[in-house]
Amino acid sequence: MEQSVHAFHELFEQLGLPSDPASIEAFIKAHAPLHDGVLLADAPFWTEGQASFLREELREDADWAELVDQLNAALRAD
């Protein structure tokens, strides 16, 4: 996998979410910890479009995949 060309806040922009540091922190705090048995894209708080984007980026190991992995890790932390 190549080095990500995007910043973490840009992933939130891509998902149509507020992308300032306080909003990102609030989003993670509101939705963490994500249960181990739930795939990131299957979490109930995503829209259909957001979930589809997350799945596709991971499946294709695309530009956003590294940041999707970072988001996944952040949502799994206690």
Image (cartoon, rainbow, N blue to C red):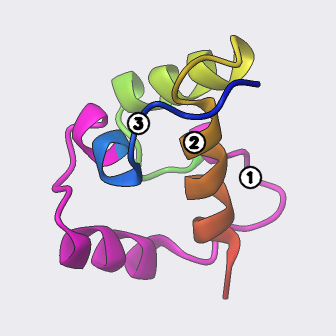
Specify the segment rendered in magenta. 12-41
- Report which residue position mark 1 lands on: 38
Q: Nearer the viewer, residue 65 or 41?
A: 65
Q: Is residue 47 left or right of residue 36?
A: left
> Of callouts 1 and 2, which one flags the residue occurring earlier in the amino acid sequence?
1
Q: Nearer the viewer, residue 9 or 74?
A: 9
Q: Which image quadrant is residue 14 in?
A: top left
Residue flagged by tag 2: what amino acid is it? Val
Query: Between tags 1 and 3, which lies in front?
Result: 3
> Of callouts 1 and 3, which one flags the residue occurring earlier in the amino acid sequence?
3
Query: Between tags 1 and 2, which lies in front?
Result: 2
Residue flagged by tag 1: what amino acid is it? Val
- Report which residue position mark 2 lands on: 68
- The residue lying at 59 percent from left, 38 percent from top is 41
Whole-angstrom CA distance, mark 1 to mark 2, is 15 Å
Whole-percent x, y for residue 47 in the image: 35, 35
- The residue lying at 82 percent from left, 64 percent from top is 36
* Mark sitting on residue 6: 3
Whole-angstrom CA distance, mark 1 to mark 3, is 25 Å
Whether the residues at callouts 1 and 3 have beta carbons within 8 Å, the answer is: no
Whether the residues at callouts 3 and 2 have beta carbons within 8 Å, the answer is: no
